Each structure stands twice: as C-alpha cells, then as structure tokens.
C-alpha cells in the first residue's frame, strides 16, 4: 500500500487528478458505447439479429461488470484504489482490442464480457477517490465533471468508431481504441496518488469490515433502493436509446455511417456536457440546504425529457431532430452529479467504494443489462408489422421508464435525509 497524499492536496494537483479520471472514464464509455455505431457493419458482416446485438451491448457487458463490482470495490476500500483502476483500465482496453478479432456472435459476446470484467474496477473506486480529493461543498460538481466522461466517451465512440469503420473497417475501430487505453494505463498510475480516506469528513474512517458487514447497513436503507431502482429505470431508456439511435438514424432517416457519426456525436457531446454540468451545479446549490434536492432535480429532468424524446423520434427533419434530441440528451444525464453525491452520503468514508459498487450493481444489471436488449427485442417483434420503422416504435414503448424513474426519485427524496451519513 502506497503512502497517501497529504490530507489536502493542492488545487492544481486535484484538477490534474480529476482530468486523468475523466480521461479514463472517457475511454471507459468509448469502449462501452462504440458497439452502437458499429452495429450496422457488424450485423451485416456477422449475420446477427437486433436481439443478438442488444445482448452484446447490454447483457454480455453487464454480467461480469455487475457481479465483480462489489468484491472489487470492497478491495478498493482496503487497498490502493489507483492500482486497481490502473489494472482495470489495461484489462478492459485489451478486451476491447480483442473485439476486433471476433468471428461470430459468441466470440464477440465473450470479448464484450471481458470488457465488463475490466470495467468492474473502473468506476466505483473513482467515486471514492473524488470524495477524498474534494470537500462536500464541491462533490456534486466534481462528480458531475468526472461524469463528463460519459458524453465525451459516448460521443468519441460514435465519432471515431464510425469514421474509422468507414475509412478501414469495424475491426480496426475496436483495435485502435483498445490500444489507446493500454497506453494510458502506466501514465495514470504514475500521476494519480492514493489520497487519505475521509480527509474532508468530520468522522474518521470506520475500521475494516467483512463484505457482508459493509453491505448490510447500506441495503437496509430504503433510500438506497429507491435511488438505485430509480436510476436503473432511467438507464433502461438511457442506455437503450443511446445504443440504438445510430441504427434508428440509418433505418428511419436514411443517414450514412459518416453522417450519423457526426450528427449523433455532436448531439451526445454538446447535450451531454451541458446536462451533466447543470445537474451537478443544481445539486450543489440546492442540496446544501435540502438533501432531497439531490433526487428532485433528476426527477424533474426525466419528466421534461420524456415528451422531448417522443417529439424528436417523430420528426423527419434532420435540423429539427438535432435540437429536439439535444434537449433530452442533456436532461437524460442531469441525474449523474446529484444522484452519485447522494449515494456517497449513504455510507461512511471507508465504505464509499462498496456503496458505489452496490448502486452500480443495481443500476447496470437492470439498466444496461435490460436496456439494449429490450429495444432490440421489441424491434424484432415489431419488424413483421412496421419493417424498418420498428425501432421507432420500440423507442416509443421504452419512454415510460422515465416516468417510473421520476416516481421512485420523488419517493426516495422523502427518505433521503433520514438515511444521510454526515
């Protein structure tokens, strides 16, 4: 175990650490989301169905990502988080490169499972690191800034994946982005140091416990389940739509691979960055006075996002579609800063990696595991009736998950202050 950094590292160093965490998270989502833009070429080359693509985009990744997340996080609460993240970054990047060697459904499915194994150690330890690098008054914004990796990584996955596939082929896209992550791993390890646990918290870290002892108190809190299931409901729609929008633009709007890469990449980057930052800013501003605001802000965002997505999917005008998709894309990610901050305060400082992993287990097992498969399966079921337009109606059917999410967050907001750990 390395010697921790001073209790309060300099602002400059904290920004460098945050920047590298964002870069790692960007590659995390780039490797995770690149499959969406490459779905068309992969489907044609390997002869796959929408349901099979949905399984690879969700269940193949989510199986080990969720199963290993909690034990890896328990280790991160007791050992070096930076070493764990370095190994995870190298592992998921290596399996991403191996995706380019797939010869059929099962080889690609197994390679995507490997990506999930690596990424199991990439997020929960980062949440814990940020909570020990930034005081409570800045955590929602710091976690929101870290979450910039989601729209940036998703946008770059869409953009680079599409452009590389157009210039070379889809296999080269996997190999190139995978090698980029392997190159970053040693730089990350050299620069990011292990901070002191609980440096900005009033109470000292609790002593080490067994995995059951760490998880048990958290799982007995009603607000944890309401937050996790609310986020999972929104992620069914969020992950599902993000994965299938490139195919929707191809089938329903007739866009080429390069055009939809540029179009959707711009929507994801601009809308996502604005939404993530606005959610974090509102979370810090309103949550300081009333913890319930950490859940009410995303609940309001999802209620507004639903009709915006519905109108966006209906339009045939590319110019109008860009602005209509831009709004819900931002609102769809506004929950990240506030909700992740709330989860960090449901556990003491020495158990935050485990708390984050438990949240991610529920969110990703349901949201990621079910989301991409759900839209693909509904699209396959509706194809005999609607043909190429089946994806449009599959998206309509999934928007109701936003209402479920908003309801769970509103109920959770009433319980949050009772379960809050100072």
Image: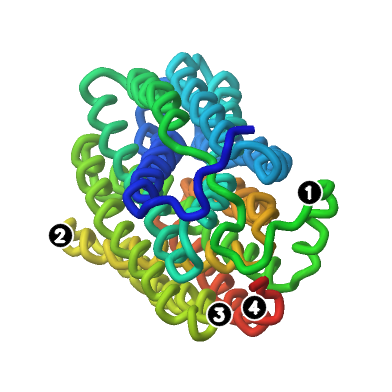
Front position among marks 2 and 3 = 3
Q: Earlier in the sequence, mark 1 or mark 4?
A: 1
Front position among marks 3 and 1 = 1
Query: Is 153 placed left or right of 382 in the picture?
Result: left
Residue 416: mark in rendering: 4
Indicate the position of residue 14 as horizontal and vertical percent values: 39, 50
Q: Earlier in the sequence, mark 2 or mark 3?
A: 3
Q: Secondary structure at mark 4?
A: helix
Few, some or many residues within 10 Å of mark 1 (<14, 14–19, 20+): few
- In depth, the one of 334 and 134 nearer the eye is 134
Query: Is 44 placed left or right of 350 in the picture?
Result: left
Residue 208: mark in rendering: 1
Q: Secondary structure at mark 1?
A: loop
For the image, the number of numbered tags is: 4
Few, some or many residues within 10 Å of mark 2 (<14, 14–19, 20+): few
Indicate the position of residue 419 as horizontal and vertical percent values: 70, 75
Q: CA distance from mark 3 to mark 4?
A: 7 Å
């Amino acid at each position: 175990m390395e010697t921790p950094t001073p209790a309060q590292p300099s602002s400059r160093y904290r920004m460098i650490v945050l920047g590298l965490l964002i870069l790692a998270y960007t590659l995390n989502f780039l490797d995770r989301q690149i499959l969406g833009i490459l779905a068309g070429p992969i489907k044609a080359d390997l002869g796959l169905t929408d349901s099979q693509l949905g399984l690879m985009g969700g269940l193949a990744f989510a199986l080990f990502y969720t199963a290993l997340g909690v034990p890896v996080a328990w280790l991160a609460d007791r050992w070096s988080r930076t070493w764990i993240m370095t190994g995870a970054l190298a592992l998921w990047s290596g399996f991403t490169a191996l995706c380019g060697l797939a010869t059929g459904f099962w080889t690609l499915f197994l390679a995507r499972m490997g990506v999930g194994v690596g990424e199991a150690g990439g997020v929960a330890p980062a949440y814990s690191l940020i909570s020990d690098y930034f005081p409570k008054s800045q955590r929602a914004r710091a976690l929101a800034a870290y979450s910039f990796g989601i729209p940036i990584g998703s946008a770059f996955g869409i953009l680079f994946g599409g452009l590389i596939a157009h210039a070379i082929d889809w296999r080269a896209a996997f190999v190139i982005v995978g090698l980029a992550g392997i190159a970053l791993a040693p730089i990350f390890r050299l620069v990011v140091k292990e901070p002191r646990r609980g440096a900005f918290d009033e109470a000292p870290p609790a002593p080490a416990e067994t995995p059951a002892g760490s998880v048990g108190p958290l799982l007995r809190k009603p607000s944890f389940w309401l937050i996790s299931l609310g986020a999972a409901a929104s992620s069914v729609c969020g992950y599902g739509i993000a994965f299938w929008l490139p195919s929707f633009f191809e089938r329903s709007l007739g866009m080429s691979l390069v055009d939809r890469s540029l179009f959707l990449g711009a929507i994801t980057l601009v809308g996502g960055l604005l939404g993530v930052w606005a959610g974090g800013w509102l979370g810090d501003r309103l949550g300081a006075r009333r913890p319930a605001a950490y859940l009410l802000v995303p609940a309001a965002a999802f209620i507004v996002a639903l009709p915006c997505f519905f109108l966006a999917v209906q339009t045939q005008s590319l110019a109008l579609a860009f602005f209509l998709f831009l709004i819900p894309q931002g609102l769809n990610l506004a929950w990240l800063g506030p909700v992740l901050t709330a989860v960090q305060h449901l556990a003491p400082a020495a158990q935050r990696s485990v708390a984050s992993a438990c949240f991610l287990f529920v969110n990703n097992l349901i949201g990621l595991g079910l989301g991409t498969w759900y839209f693909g399966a509904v699209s396959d079921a509706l194809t005999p009736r609607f043909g190429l337009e089946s994806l449009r109606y599959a998206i309509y059917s999934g928007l109701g998950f936003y209402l479920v999410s908003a309801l769970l967050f509103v109920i959770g907001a009433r319980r949050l202050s009772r379960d809050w750990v100072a």
